[in-house]
Amino acid sequence: MFFYYFRKEKIKRRVLAEIKQLKDKKGFIRAGLPRFNRLFGRDSLISAWQLLDENSGICQATLEILSQYQGKVFNNEKEEEPGKIIHETDLEKSHHPAGFYPFPYYGSIDSTPLFLIVFAFYFKKTKDIKFLDYHWENILRAINWIEEYGDKDKDLFLEYQRKNEKGLFHQGWKDGFEDHLKIEPPVAIVEAQGYQYLALKEISELAKIKKDFDLEKKLINRAKILKEKFNERFWMPDKKFYCLALNGKKEQRKAITSNPGHLLFTGIIDENKVAPVVKRLFQDDLWTPFGIRTHSKLEPDFDPKSYHLGSVWPHDNWIIAQGLKKLGYKKEYQKIKNALLRAYKELGFIPELYGTIDGKILKISQACYPQAWASGALLNFLLTPLERSGFLTGLVG
């Protein structure tokens, strides 16, 4: 407790400085240093969400620039499709630093539903009807992408399969150029279905405000059927947990991972499945003193130092914590908050990811620092409601 109360201000100032370091002149937050010092759809949206209560201008700037880069045509090299939100781009360069693909690159299954979710969160916070009206067509195009291109086989699930052989093989947040998740495409990754569900629900409310009642009804109906199908197809009754994904044959990839924890804030989980999911996340094969692992140590491919197969990511834990808080799991929310503070205390900073072995924290050399959604997670945890007024003043001009 001494650490929390007497070093809290110092930690806040440090992570604020990290976020300022990553702030682009256009107002959005770049993903991280040294390898990701540019605009990422997923990362920038989650960072904007983390900072929304402190400074809504960051969120507005992020939504604005992502709207500008929203997909307009079909381009397999860029994996661009009409209405799709980018995976990443550099405002000053035309290609990935390693030459993998041209910018802007659109290989992300979740940036589009996250765009819709964060847009709805922004509107709830600000009631900025002028901004909503100005970008309503961007919202409609994103919804159309979900229905027409994100769900190509019309089974209601969002699926990805790369079109550029040099592009990302996996295109959820645990992305990568190789098949490290061992899932045959097209891949319906679990958390993207929850994001889609919440996006449908949130935009249906905005459609009501816009008096587009046909759209409201359509989105509510899709969400209802999606929830039913999702809980039928992704649930593993023997494990009382959701699978990592469905593969191209609609078979479950049965690994135990942190991914289903992202579902908690979305509302897609059947009520009778919430408690088992929460309980499973805190069992010893996933839970550590420094947060929830990405991958169970009981899985045959577990590696505590792996990027996605056993390490701990602060932003991953923060998203899980948002669902715990929303559903009233205050004790579990506090456990994650304390775990990230403990990680900060041990490392002296909060990186993109870290490992844990035998209850001890391990630095991972490939981890970036500062990383926007890691710093944003810690800052969000530290600021109380009374402190959420003006603390980030000046971050966005």
Image (cartoon, rainbow, N blue to C red):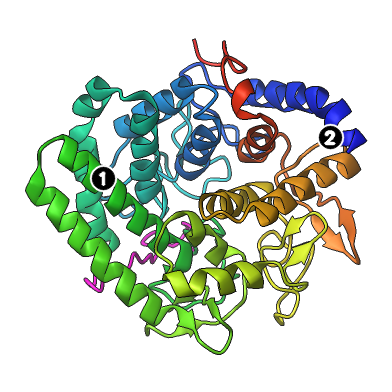
Compared across the picture, whether 207 is left or right of 240 comes to left
* CA separation in Å, label 2 and label 1: 39 Å
Hey, what amino acid is under mark 1?
Ile
Residue 46, image x and y in percent? 51, 41
Q: With respect to residue 373, does 146 lie above or below?
A: below
Hey, what amino acid is under mark 2?
Tyr
Question: What count of labels does the image hold?
Answer: 2
Secondary element at image label 2: helix
Secondary element at image label 1: helix
| Viewer-nearest of discs 2 and 1 | 2
Q: Which of 158/234 is in front?
A: 234
Disc on the earlier residue, 2 or 1: 2
Are dots 2 and 1 in contact, CB under 8 Å? no
Magenta segment boundaries in residue numbering: 152-169
Which residue is drawn at the image coordinates 66% and 29% (left, top)?
383
Residue 281, image x and y in percent? 65, 67
Asked if residue 83 shows in the view, the reply is no
Which residue is drawn at the image coordinates 56% and 90% (left, top)?
238
Q: Which residue is under mark 1? A: 203
Asked if residue 16 shows in the view, the reply is yes
- Residue 332, located in which quarter of the rendered image? bottom right
Residue 200, image x and y in percent? 28, 53
Labelled disc at residue 4? 2
Does the segment drawn in magenta span residue 71?
Answer: no
